[in-house]
Image (cartoon, rainbow, N blue to C red):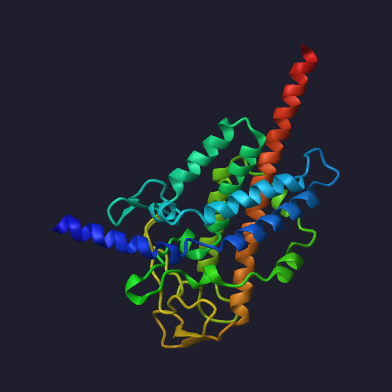
């Protein structure tokens, strides 16, 4: 009887799975990927590393969207939360794995062991999907966003608009993200996630608070945090105590400029992290091609 009830409960959750949000919308992933490819190619002009071709970008973007828009059953059993502890408790609701760490490692290994060029770019697309994901506070801290008992299935930050004009202007001629090229995809993922956590803990411009009233980190690395007094209201009007040791109230309006500024910086982090992953891939592929060419020439 108990197992039957548990089965019915799981079945009910799976029926809700198509409505659950597992991060950014697939179209947002695609746009972030295109912006990253454009920024990278601009920075590679005149250099030794070859730029991405339109076809390669399509392979990456399509695979990226595919992971974000994958089968609901697959997404339900491989949730999209970052594990900063890299090894703590990863179980929730029986067999459901709340962290994507293992899948990310599998993708990196798969990319390194795949010879087919198209498949390698598709693997890269899946890798950068996770890099983009950890630019979102509820994914990086992490904070569990689904509240079934309130009929709320996602974090409002993940659905916040992508201001393409502001993003394009902010990227401009910036190539600083390549100043210290990363050595691994894991390094890129961890750096973007850490930057997101730091952004949440940073002062909110013009108000005596941080962004922690929206997302409060857990007590230790890798532990789930929770929504603070501002609740899951990013982008909406929110009024809350500025801090626990004061009665002063902080107020953000619907579509407040502070929301737009915070979201823009997280989207920039997603684009730059994606461009770094693309650069790492192109750099390694170029080195392999030169080695092969040198070996053939020697023969």
Left or right, 119 with respect to 297, comes to left
Pick the quarter of the image with the N terminus: bottom left
Percent position (x, y) of residue 27? 61, 62
Query: Does residue 90 lie above or below 215 as drawn?
Result: above
- Asked if residue 160 shows in the view, the reply is yes
Which residue is depicted at the point 44% across and 54% down?
A: 75
Q: Position of residue 35 (x, y in %)?
A: 71, 58
- Residue drawn at x 68%, y 51% as measured from the top left: 275
Q: In the image, residue 119 lies at what x, y percent? A: 61, 38
- Return the residue found at the far left: 1
Q: Residue lying farthest right?
A: 46
**Does residue 134 lie above or below 256 as drawn?**
above
Q: Residue furthest top?
A: 299
Report which quarter residue 111 is drawn in: top right
Q: Is residue 176 above or below residue 160?
A: above
Residue shown at 61% from the left, 59% from the top: 29
Identified at 19% across, 61% down, the residue is 5
Q: Is residue 202 visible?
A: no
Q: Quadrant of the C terminus?
A: top right
Considering depth in this image, is 200 or 130 the residue closer to the camera? 130
Residue 295 % position (x, y): 74, 17
């Amino acid at each position: 009887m108990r197992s039957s009830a548990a089965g019915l409960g799981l079945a009910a959750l799976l029926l809700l799975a198509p409505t659950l949000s597992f991060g950014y919308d697939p179209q947002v992933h695609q746009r972030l990927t295109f912006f990253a490819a454009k920024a990278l190619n601009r920075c590679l002009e005149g250099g030794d590393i070859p730029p991405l071709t339109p076809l390669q970008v399509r392979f990456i973007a399509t695979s990226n969207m595919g992971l974000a828009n994958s089968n609901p059953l697959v997404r339900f059993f491989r949730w999209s939360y970052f594990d900063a502890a890299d090894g703590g408790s990863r179980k929730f609701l029986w067999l459901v794995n709340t962290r994507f760490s293992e899948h990310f490692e599998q993708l990196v290994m798969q990319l390194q062991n795949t010879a087919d060029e198209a498949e390698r770019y598709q693997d890269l697309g899946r890798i950068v999907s996770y890099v983009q994901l950890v630019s979102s506070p509820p994914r990086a801290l992490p904070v569990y966003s689904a509240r079934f008992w309130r009929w709320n299935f996602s974090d409002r930050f993940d659905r916040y608009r992508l201001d393409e004009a502001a993003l394009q202007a902010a990227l401009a001629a910036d190539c600083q993200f390549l100043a210290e090229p990363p050595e691994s995809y894991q390094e890129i993922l961890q750096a973007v996630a850490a930057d997101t956590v730091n952004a949440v803990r940073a002062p909110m411009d013009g108000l005596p608070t941080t962004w922690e009233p929206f997302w409060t980190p857990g007590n230790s690395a890798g532990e789930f945090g929770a929504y603070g007094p501002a609740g899951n209201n990013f982008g909406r009007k929110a009024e809350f105590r500025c801090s626990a040791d004061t009665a002063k109230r902080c107020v953000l309006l619907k579509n407040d400029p502070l929301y737009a500024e915070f979201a823009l910086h997280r989207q920039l982090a997603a684009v730059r992290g994606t461009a770094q992953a693309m650069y790492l891939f192109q750099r390694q592929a170029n080195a392999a091609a030169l080695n092969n060419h040198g070996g053939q020439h020697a023969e």
